[in-house]
Image (cartoon, helix red, strand yellow):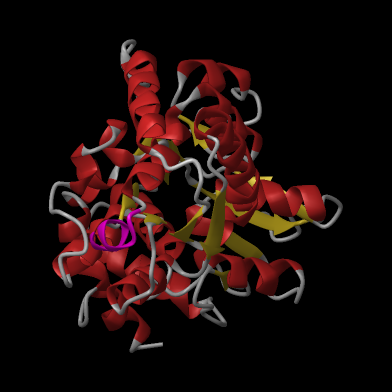
Amino acid sequence: MSTRPPFFSFAIAAILTAASLAATAQQAVSLLNVSYDPTRELYAEYNAAFAKHWKARTGQEVTIKQSHGGSGKQARAVIDGLDADVVTLALAGDVDAIHKNGGWIPKDWQKRLPLASSPYTSTIVLVVRAGNPKGIRDWDDLIKPGVSVITPNPKTSGGARWNYLAAWEFARRKYGSEAKAGDFMAKLFANVPVLDTGARGSSITFAQRNQGDVFLSWENEAYLLEKEFGNKVDLVYPSLSILAQPPVTVVDKNVDRKGTRAVAQAYLQFLYTEEAQDIIGRNFYRPTSAAAQAKYAKQLPKVNLFTVEEAFGGWDKADKTHFADGGSFDQIYSKK
């Protein structure tokens, strides 16, 4: 897993200092972070830490408001006018859409922060009922008769797209062709009784409404379920999964109109500091700093991961092939 370059801590300190000097101490400021479903707990803790940091540096009070939902749905809300200062979405394709539909951000938005603007990573795991009564160990167990699979809708949920691509690539490698991978996915979705719009909705469907035998889950969401329902669920790491790289960016048109660019940029830059990286690991996301990676190595084990670029040629190509109107998901689900 990538770590930031050795000079980066010094660069961040300089940027934050410059932003501090630009702040107006006498006037409180408010930011809106439009995020995806499972980040509620992460940003509740992070926002408090950043507000304390910003107040100490500038004397300025900052309030961060949150909006959560399926990542694709959240991107559409920003395109339609939701007044986001920053977005912290599930996948780069959703952020790209904010550029393509109205030019809210520049095309090269990923170059503005380190690690392609992804300060943390995650992956997709399987959450099963306690004791794993259906014996689910890997992706191919999901297509067995009588196995009910809970996953959100790839049309609205970034997490669902990660789920879909992880399963597709497993099947392509195991069965040897795109066509057989498509057949595998058709069988998998035949076992899906309901499609929620976002990952948190699917989590509720599985854990609180007791639907399904297995939930395809963000790793951090799986640990939260284990923490809350420890005697009811077990976590299974499949033999292969996907390296999820949730990206972040300032929404340029909004921050320039509102005059919040300095604090919004500092808010995202702070994610790369050691204090924030520790918060990230504590909330079951995978940090990108070497120190935090080492600290949380036992909690977040090494997994055999592939990237969207390696397997699908990047998000633009993956979206067109699998999630655009008429793509593989539409073809599969229309036959259900």
Compared with residue 188, is residue 233 higher up or lower down, i.e. above or below?
Answer: above
Instruction: Answer with the quarter of the image where residue 8 lies.
Output: top left
At 22% across and 75% down in the image, what residue appears? 324
Quadrant in the picture for the N terminus = top left
In the displayed structure, does residue 129 sit left or right of residue 270? Answer: right
Start-end of magenta stretch: 253-259
Tell me if residue 258 is in the magenta stretch. Answer: yes
| Place of residue 205 in the rendered image (x, y in percent of width and height, measured from the top left) | 67, 74
> In this orientation, which residue lies closer to the viewer: 162 or 90?
90
The furthest residue to the front: 26
For the point 55% across and 38% down, the residue is 50
Residue sticking out furthest to the right: 231
Q: Which of 317 and 282 is in front in this view?
A: 282
- Magenta stretch: helix, strand or loop mostly: helix
> Is residue 220 covered in magenta?
no
Asked whether 56 or 80 is in front, the reply is: 56
Q: Which residue is rendered at x = 63% and y = 63% of the image?
A: 214
Determine if residue 20 is in view: yes
Q: Where is residue 91 in the image (x, y as percent from the top left)?
A: 34, 54
